[in-house]
Amino acid sequence: MDMLLQIEKMNQHYAVDALCWKYTKPYDFYNNILTSNAILELLSNKYYVVLDGCDEFIGFFCTGRSAQVPAGDSFHVYNEDCVDIGLGMKPELTGKGKGYEFFSHILHFVEENHNGKDIRLTVATFNKRAIHLYEKVGFVKQMEFSSLEADFITMIKSNT
């Protein structure tokens, strides 16, 4: 993967592609079902694609409400004023040491566009690989909560 990464707005082509990605266990928790509502979600909110230097679609991310897990609301985990981010990397590229550069590029973009606000993300507690990456770039564990599907943790990177 040539790491001259570019960020572009999500479009229908990339939305359909991303919704068809299939992860292996235990990450199959992140698999989606291709529906018109799912496509609409990716097109109507703050979703972006990450392309490598060869214009290959390698991942995506979103900011705002779309990045939150709705079950977290009743646990008040989103009360602090932060920029929420969520992300996904193409399944074939995960677990190969490419996450740091991929995620750092996304973080840089988000920080540039949100004037030094703290950044928060929500991750399933079983996803040790992602949690390790997030800690490596400065995120600190905050609150834990459960939904019917999984246990989650919020992590915050302070930009003050």
Image (cartoon, rainbow, N blue to C red):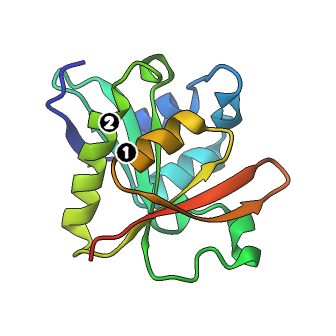
Query: Disc 1 or 2, which lies upstream in sequence?
Result: 2
Which residue occupies 70% across, 22% down? 25
Q: Answer above or below: position of 72 versus 126.
A: below
The image quadrant of residue 79 is bottom right
**Residue 146 drawn at (x, y percent):** 79, 59
Within 10 Å of the Cα at label 2, are there few (<14), some (14-19), or many (20+) other Cα atoms? some
Name the residue beneath numbered marker 1. Answer: 136
- What amino acid does circle 2 point to? Tyr
Which residue occupies 29% across, 53% down? 107
Q: Secondary structure at mark 1?
A: helix
Which residue occupies 68% across, 35% down? 33
Q: Is residue 80 left or right of residue 104?
A: right
Q: Answer above or below: position of 88 versus 54.
A: below
Q: Answer above or below: position of 156 versus 35.
A: below
* Mark toward the viewer: 1 or 2: 1
Q: Could one spot residue 155 in this view of the protein?
A: yes
- Which of the pair 86/56 is nearer the observer? 86
- Which of the pair 36/48 is nearer the observer? 48
Name the residue beneath numbered marker 2. Answer: 100
Task: Please identify the quadrant where the C terminus is shown.
Answer: bottom left
Q: CA distance from mark 1 to mark 2?
A: 8 Å
Labels 1 & 2 near each other (Cβ < 8 A): yes
Q: How many marks?
A: 2
Q: Could one spot residue 10 in this view of the protein?
A: no
Task: Please identify the quadrant where the N terminus is shown.
Answer: top left
Q: Answer above or below: position of 11 versus 76.
A: above
Q: Residue furthest right?
A: 148
- What amino acid does circle 1 point to? Lys
The image quadrant of residue 26 is top right
**Residue 38 drawn at (x, y percent):** 61, 46
Within 10 Å of the Cα at label 1, are there few (<14), some (14-19), or many (20+) other Cα atoms? few
